Image (spheres, helix red, strand yellow):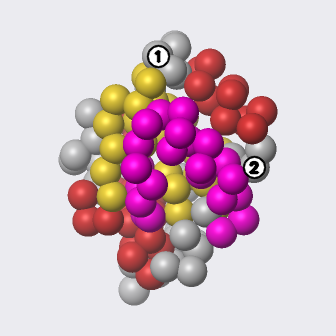
Amino acid sequence: MGWFSSSSSKFNWNFITDDNILQDLIKLSFSEKVLVFKHSTSCSISTMSKNRLESSGDNSKIESCYLLDLLNYRDISSKIERDFKVTHESPQVLIIENGECIYNASHNEISWDNIP
């Protein structure tokens, strides 16, 4: 049952817990692409999407991956929606480059194959 268990995952998430971390990842996006995964911990589809990213093992495209817990940090999610002009969805992946969202996907579209 690999869909619901990430215990064997070696995936390294950075957690967005405040605006300073969000600002830091935006600054980082000027030197490399950054992935932001907006995750609802109470949603099984969100958990499956997260585990799909973790288990595929092909995050070599993007080394800096950030996770936002939507239930605990809704205000940061709203700021991301406003600042990047991306309609909120859950689960959702955003790719940030040069301070802008260049790609976003949700639900079953979330996979390393689809990420630029």
Image spot of residue 20 (x, y percent)? 77, 33
Q: Is residue 50 magenta?
A: no
Lower position in the chain sequence, tag 2 or tag 1: 2
* Apparent side of residue 34 relative to residue 71 in the rendered image (left or right): left
Residue 45 visible in this rendered orientation of the protein = yes
Up/down of 78 relative to 22, above or below: below
Q: Secondary structure at mark 2?
A: loop
Q: Is residue 83 magenta?
A: yes
* Label 1 packing within 10 angstroms: few (<14), some (14-19), many (20+): some
Up/down of 16 relative to 102, above or below: below
Q: Residue at x 52, y 14 (%)?
A: 30
Q: Which of these two is toward me, 116 or 74? A: 74
Which corner quadrant of the image does residue 86 belong to? top left
Residue picked out by circle 2: 17
Which corner quadrant of the image does residue 22 belong to? top right
Which corner quadrant of the image does residue 96 belong to? top left
Image spot of residue 104 (x, y percent)? 34, 44
Q: Residue at x 53, y 63 (%)?
A: 39
Q: Residue at x 32, y 65 (%)?
A: 107
Residue 15 visible in this rendered orientation of the protein = no
Amino acid type at circle 1 is Asn
Amino acid type at circle 2 is Thr
Q: Residue at x 66, y 48 (%)?
A: 76
Start-end of magenta stretch: 71-93
The disc placed on residue 98 is: 1
Image spot of residue 92 (x, y percent)? 41, 56
